[in-house]
Amino acid sequence: MTEIEENLFNETFRAFTEATNDGVSQSSAEVPTEFRRKMDQGNAVFSAFKVHRMQNDIAAQMYDSNGVLKSFEQWKKDVHPMLDHHVEHWLKTEYDTAVIRARQAADWQRFEQYADILPNLEWMPSTSANPGADHKVFWGTILPISHPFWSAHRPGDRWNCKCSLSATDEPPTGAPRESTDPKNQPAPGLDNNPGVDGRLFSDTHPYVSNAYDGAKEAVKAFLKDKFPDYAKVKIEPRHNQDEKYSERTKELKKEAAESIKGKELVNSNFKHKVLIGQKNVKEWLNQPHEHYAHKNEMILNIEETFKKAKYVGIVSKYKDIPKLVQSHLFETKILGDKSWIIVREYEDGSFRLHSITDSSKILQHLKKERS
């Protein structure tokens, strides 16, 4: 089984997004938009590998040891314990650990921000009522934030670890000798620093390292289709960087003008070709949006994005725009959130790209189909 079941992915991805939100909210740090995007992308990859593993584990139970197809009742009986482990036990542990590591990732962003004032980090004891012995050798360790020790060991590199780090200007203690002991190494999948790469789970997790054949290709293809608009943002807009981002907007206008010149947009569920011009690019870039920078970068990939967009229907003319007949909506996603591409139909029979919106209020103007 190579294809990833989308509904199962959606629920799994939703759970890890919720865990990330919970963890980040527990930290007092302000997480940059671009770093949060890395966390979401990491969650999407991990969710896809998890679903692929679960699907194939379940499918493998359809046949007995002789290759004979089992009855439905026998198959149901055999997969029940597996589902219990996948959904109840493993997901619960993964969720709780994701909350912890998301909080620690956010904390790390704050540590880096104030490293000139508080240059060192101290490993604090576990808050667990019954802490394990595996991290006790590290309690009280104080080292600079840039010390390589933190790349090999840190709170959160064990499942459900409740240790933490605290920024300090106290002098370093040196790394414990026990840090090289094999028994003190991170658990598979937790050996990265999420505060640096934004990934709550690494590629050493068994879902990835021991994945079924074809898993990597399936995940890559699924996520490319699921999130076709993950654009590489060159500059994230900030409230204190308006001037800097305006330069990127100018670059996009120029790049888009060159790349879309003479192009027509097509969609298999829409029989008309859609024209696009410089005026449309300007309108697109000026449109407010929750994912403003990603929405803007999308214009450079508008042909592929429009081709994969879902045709929603017709919007009646509700604005007094000369020669406008009606508009057409196409649903797409930016970082997993829905947006609607607007195409305007004019009296001369032309169809032109107008803009994009992330406001679902526009759906209120959709024409209802006659029964």
Image (tube, helix red, strand yellow):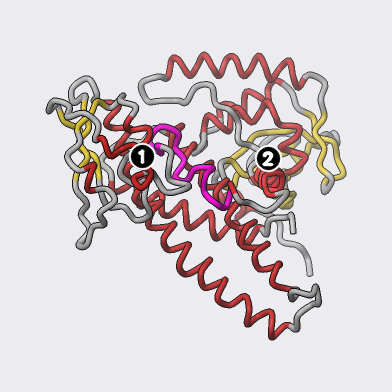
Counting from the top left corner in percent of width and height, residue 160 is at 34, 56
Quarter of the picture containing the N terminus is: bottom right
Counting from the top left corner in percent of width and height, residue 188 is at 47, 48
Quarter of the picture containing the C terminus is: bottom right
Left or right, residue 26 beside residue 249: left
- Residue 1 visible in the snapshot: yes
**What residue appears at the point 18 percent right and 26 percent down from the top-left corner?**
118
| Residue 363 is a magenta residue | no
Looking at the image, is 363 positioned above or below residue 149? below
Which of the 4 quarters of the picture holds residue 298? Answer: top right
Name the residue carrying label 2. 342
Name the residue carrying label 1. 105
Amino acid type for the residue under numbered disc 1 = Ala
Give the secondary structure at mark 2: strand
- Residue interval drawn in magenta: 193-208
Left or right, residue 358 beside residue 156: right
